[in-house]
Amino acid sequence: MPKLPPGHFWPTPPNSEPSISRPSSRSQRSEQTASGSSTRGQFGISNVKYRVGAPPLRPLPLETGFTEDCARAEIILDKAQIADAEVDFVARHVPQELWTAQPTIFIVAPWGEDSRDKWEAVIKELKGYVDRKLDDIGWRGVDIGVEMVAPQLTMWKYMAPIVNPVLESDWPTIQASIYEILESFAATKSHMTTISLLRLGYSPIRHQNPETVYVSVDYESREVTWPPVVQRIEAYLATLNHHLCLHLENNIVQNLPFQPLEPTEGAVPAKDTGLDRDYQRQVNLGDDIGMALYVIRKDGKRCNGGCGTLGCYLEIKTKSDQGSWKKVALTNYHVVRSAIPGFSLKPKNTVQALPGTSAVIDQAVAITAIDVPIISSELSESDKRGFFLSTATNFTPVESPSRRNHNFNIHQLQKRIDVLTKNADARGLQAVAAATAPLTQNLASKVSFFNSGRQHLGTLFAGSGFTRRTSENHRLDWALIDVVPGRQGDNMLPVEAKWVAEYSDMTHCPLPTGCGIPLRPKQQGRSLKDVTPGEILFKVGMKTGVSAGYFSHVKSNCWLEDDKHMGMPRSSEYLFLGHEGKPFGDHGDSGSVVYDAEGQVLGLLFTGLSPQQTNAGHTFVTPIEDVFEDVIKFSKGGITDIRIAV
């Protein structure tokens, strides 16, 4: 059986209380398309391409934990003449929502023309057998699911940008036509989250995969209702001369700050949290930043404020500075929203782990969701109109390192000390003291750094809000931070050795002339808009560190989950695809700047999503000149010039 890819989903599991209420759309089951019966009565079956199961299935992706084989399933499969099937008994759960786990007999088998009928017969017989056995031992309250999937839903997929000038020219028309089709069906109307064009398939040789229209819809849209939509889109694509494939799945586009949650032992906040070194006074390009507060969730749970990446330092001229250059830091607006009064968090709606039982969800693993701003609050106004210095007087300051990373470091250091001292007598008091001394000193130093206020980075200077767009319908999502002089760092790019350590293939590293130098301003005539499709560009973020990505000149339409409350129309964004095995951007990388092999700044990273069964992900980037132009325009004469800090 093909190996299932490990879960790669951007949300980080929090440590906060659950809310036992109606199921979230992410956990709701499909409408049934058929039914069967067992000793418990009727049970529903959902039957879609590549996937049949009972009870009706939840939308993909689901994570799988393997336990043991189910011999009975092998017998039933053999009787149905389904060959080359692999069977396991697993717990299937929504990514990062462990309390949604359902014991499941999980079968992977080849899909054929008669699979819908054959598989449904297997599901009926096997589900009936399982229910009967559970009833025999008195487990009537336990529901074990049965699910069959084709290898197409377990194998890794690989992506690459498309280099096809004719198709690129036709793409806006194709994209608009597909959107019209989606809007013409109740199943997908107002549910589209992105429409992209890329190579997507199972071949590790990325450029050999088919040219594919990738469409994602939110989790309110149910897969069992898609067949007519798919048929209409495929019929339309067949009228073209481009031989395009279609892939439709549930997925959402999300901004890429760290979610404002308490750290957990299993979720490392960033690639480098500064755990084993002293916190630095100067904060540089690519370092983490966070809001200097805890946010109290609606149920009273205390959560960290949001955090992201200091993209780079800029210099601006303002009227009040009489023509002198002022140094500020650049990041995304959505990274700093939790600093603005009116920001609100809520527990994400969840369901019990085992419906019909008295199972209790572990309060340490429920997820927090960002709520809409409090009505008439400063955040509500800021989301609509942005903010400038004069309106930001009540905003919370910014700090570095972020509270999230700091809390994680303290937790880990204390854990190391506790492990060493637990059996001190057996290990020898002197040996334990020698081992714990540097850890204790490191812990005390980090606590002192925060307790003495040295984590203070600065205050918010200006931000775009959520409603601004360029003339080409690119989102504008930027914020400027007034960094105190004592903490102002530099725009130095990582040295070549750091890239070589990350990518053994030197083709995915900047040129030597683009390493270990200050970030360069974009040269005249150089723009993200004119980058060659497939060219490799680079960034430094607080979560993934250094990363390389392939540029796609074909724009994607997208809607963002985080600003859905604004009712904004879809935007058109430049797409980056990560190198195999590593995304270009991940949660925490919001605010990173993107640059070319020679160190010239080209864009500002702000959002992304990860298509199912991939680990490279989609990342969206705004051209840097659009950001600079909008900063000046937004200030209404308050800012007269802007440049990369020298």
Image (cartoon, grey):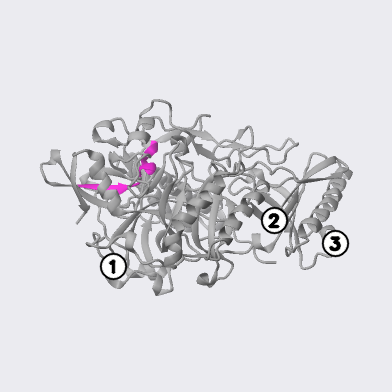
Does the magenta run of residues contain 587?
Answer: no
Marks 1 and 2 sit apart, C-alpha to C-alpha, by 47 Å
Residue 30 in sight: yes
Q: Quadrant of residue 49?
A: bottom right
Tag 3 secondary structure: loop
Of labels 3 and 1, the one closer to you = 3
Q: Out of 398 and 406, give the one closest to the viewer.
A: 398
**Front-most of 150 and 196?**
196
Q: Secondary structure at mark 2?
A: loop
Give the number of the disc on residue 512. Answer: none
Identify the mark nearer the N-term, 3 or 2: 2
First of labels 3, 1 by sequence position: 3
Instruction: Tell me, for residue 80, which label it has, or none.
Output: 3
Amino acid type, label 1: Glu
Label located before the other in sequence (1 or 2):
2
What number is the disc on residue 49?
A: 2
Relative image position of residue 509 (x, y in whole percent):
37, 70
**Mark 3 is on which residue type?**
Ala
Residue type, label 2: Lys
Give the magenta part as a residue range.
327-338
Query: In this figure, which residue is indicated by the disc labeled 1?
Result: 598
Which of the two discs, 3 and 2, sits closer to the camera? 2
Residues 631 and 494: in front is 631
